[in-house]
Amino acid sequence: MLKIKNLYSSINNTLIIKNLNLKINNGEIHILMGPNGSGKSTLSYIITGKPKYKINKGKIIFCKKIINTLSPDKISKLGIFLSFQNPIEIDGITMFNFFKNIKKKNNLKKIYKLCKILNIDKKDLYRFFNLGFSGGEKKKNEILQMLILKPKFIILDEIDSGLDIDTIKLLFKIIKHYLKNNPKCSLLIITHNTNIIKYIIPNRVHIIYNGSIILSGNSELIYRIEKNGYYSLIKKKHNDK
Amino acid sequence: MINNKFIINNLKYYINILFFNGLFLKIKIHKKLKKFYNIKYYLKKKKKIKNIKKKINSKALSPFISNLYTLILYIKNKNIYLYNKYIKLNLNFINSFSLINNINILLILDNRTFLFIKETFKNIKSNIYIINNFFFKIYLKKKSNVIYLKYKKNNFSISTINNIIIYQKKFTKFILYDINLYEKFNYNNIIINNLSNYCLSRINSIIISSNTQTTNFYLLINNNYSYCNNKQYYIGIYDDSSKSILKGLINVKKNTKNNISYQNYKNFILSNKVYINLKPYLNIYTNNIKCSHGVNIGKINKFFIYYLQSRGIKLYKAKILFFLSILYKIINIKTFKCLFKDIKNKLKLILNKKKFYV
Ligand SMILES: Nc1ncnc2c1ncn2[C@@H]1O[C@H](COP(=O)(O)OP(=O)(O)OP(=O)(O)O)[C@@H](O)[C@H]1O
Ligand SMILES: [Mg+2]
């Protein structure tokens, strides 16, 4: 589904992603972990075509199509969805109006249903988009948009940070349900939370450090991260070289 | 932003005034309105003006009344229970040939009268060019409110010179919405005189201009009293070779206290041929005041645009939504539903065609 080959990318002439390789097949769940500032959010921005992130070298291939130079709206139309680490607030545009803008077919009934599933108050639909929402409510709103857009490939950037346990459980239950109904859909989860494994079992786990993936493995890798921290793993890798 | 509790379309009671080719033609007053309101109007006739002076019987007003007026309108709310309810004054201008409309109006609102003023313009023939030369005086007596919407629909063939002078007594509100989307040339000269304590005024101006549209906005507020609140918000979105000059001067006299004066200009420049000149002035001779003024050359929030795009919204649409969310700070969508469609269309016209320079 998604293939990233020898990716080098920079912003404002600072090289941030360095020789990054990643392959995610249909229906797979991948977890991306790494220290602060290692380039996780940046990677999600590059995949979704954020302007000014220059791709110096390499290819991003989605469903056999090179998407390096596509605009974010076209990438979204192809079926890639990013749940943002820090979603925006919009003054003057209600949630419902926003949803109408992203999909014309949206009817109120459907959205009400989704709200019920997500435990979102119906009244919130008539509030301005994310304005004054709590951190958790904003994240729920991201998942609501995901359910509306029905993507083929989902990136969740720290969906679980700042959420209470019940909400994390609820969100992952919904996400798993979505994956069950869309078995070809793949998932890339960016997180700092090693407990993630309680809620969802990944096919692969990757560690990103300084702009490149330095270690990949199965879910067992998460336990190693929890035990030893990133730096011992990174050192080991260096020494092995 | 002010939250007006009313919605324009729901205002049932109206006074319709029709000007045809610059001449007063008709006045129509809603039947029920006559019950609860005392409405008098006087046309340009010398004899009558003497009578008016007697009838209105206000010393303060007499110097304003001269035989220059096309129309003098006096409205008084007789029913206390209708306090807080707006009535609508529709000023309709219909023109059948190119001309200069010279229109002088004196409007007097007696105590506790709430009025919403709206103008509409129609040209019977296309290919005609109209210059409106308005001279509008509004005298607000105690506790009366005016909301004045100046806005012309899809019409590139109208230019306007507005001279508006406001006199405000105690506990009055004057709110002006000046929405300029299509006028070729728009000259606003607005003077607000606070004649007493506790006056409130708002100027909310939106300019979205393209081609060679030109806007001049001069504002003078004379505040000689205390506890007055004068705020102005201007948002301009300029494209092509459009021009704009905005100058606002607020005078606050000595020995006044607890006044609030605020001027904010926010501008988005979409082309490098745009000329704008912005000058907010505050002449303040007292220490006991809250005031600020700021000029902002706005930038489109790129993360905002990216976020919307990442949800599949096209670039130009994302930009329209961005501007609408900015304009929201001036105009409440619920109150001005019809207007928002037109603003959207004008934004489409500008943003659809090319890239940004911002
Ligand atoms: N516009 C920019 N200009 C310069 N450097 C930038 C810019 N944007 C991001 N960076 C840098 O890129 C690096 C990666 O940032 P990124 O946000 O991707 O980290 P992250 O892995 O998501 O971290 P966290 O776990 O804290 O969210 C950081 O060092 C950051 O300072
Ligand atoms: Mg991040």
Image: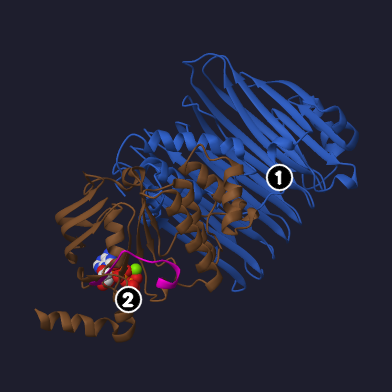
Chain colours: A brown, B blue
Indicate the amino acid at tag 2.
Ile
In the rendered view, tell whether residue A190 sits above or below residue B76.
below
Q: Position of residue B130 (x, y in %)?
A: 52, 23
Instruction: Using a 10 Å C-alpha cutoff, classify the residue at mark 2 as few (fewer than 14 neighbours), some (14 to 19) or many (20 or more).
Output: many
Q: Is residue A164 left or right of residue A69?
A: right
Question: Would you identify the image quadrant in which residue B10 lies?
Answer: top right
> What segment is highlighted magenta in the picture?
A197-208
Residue at 49% x, 59% y is B281
Residue B331 in view (yes/no): no
SS under mark 1: strand
Report the front residue among B63 and A222. Answer: A222
**Which mark is on residue B212?**
none
Residue B229 part of the magenta-drawn span: no
Residue B189 in view (yes/no): yes
Q: Position of residue A236 (x, y in %)?
A: 17, 83
Q: Where the N terminus of chain B falls, by quadrant?
A: bottom right
Question: Would you identify the image quadrant in which residue A227 lies?
Answer: bottom left
Report the front residue among B358 and B253. Answer: B358
Indicate the amino acid at tag 1.
Val
SS under mark 2: helix
Q: Position of residue B139 (x, y in %)?
A: 73, 44
Q: Chain of mark 2?
A: A
Q: Position of residue B126 (x, y in %)?
A: 49, 15
Instruction: Using a 10 Å C-alpha cutoff, classify the residue at mark 1 as few (fewer than 14 neighbours), some (14 to 19) or many (20 or more).
Output: many
Q: How many marks?
A: 2
Tell which quarter ligand 2 is in.
Answer: bottom left
Residue to which mark 1 is pinned:
B146
Residue at 46% x, 26% y is B156
Q: Which label sits in the foreground, 2 or 1?
A: 2
Residue to which mark 2 is pinned:
A222
Report the front residue among A177 and A2. Answer: A177
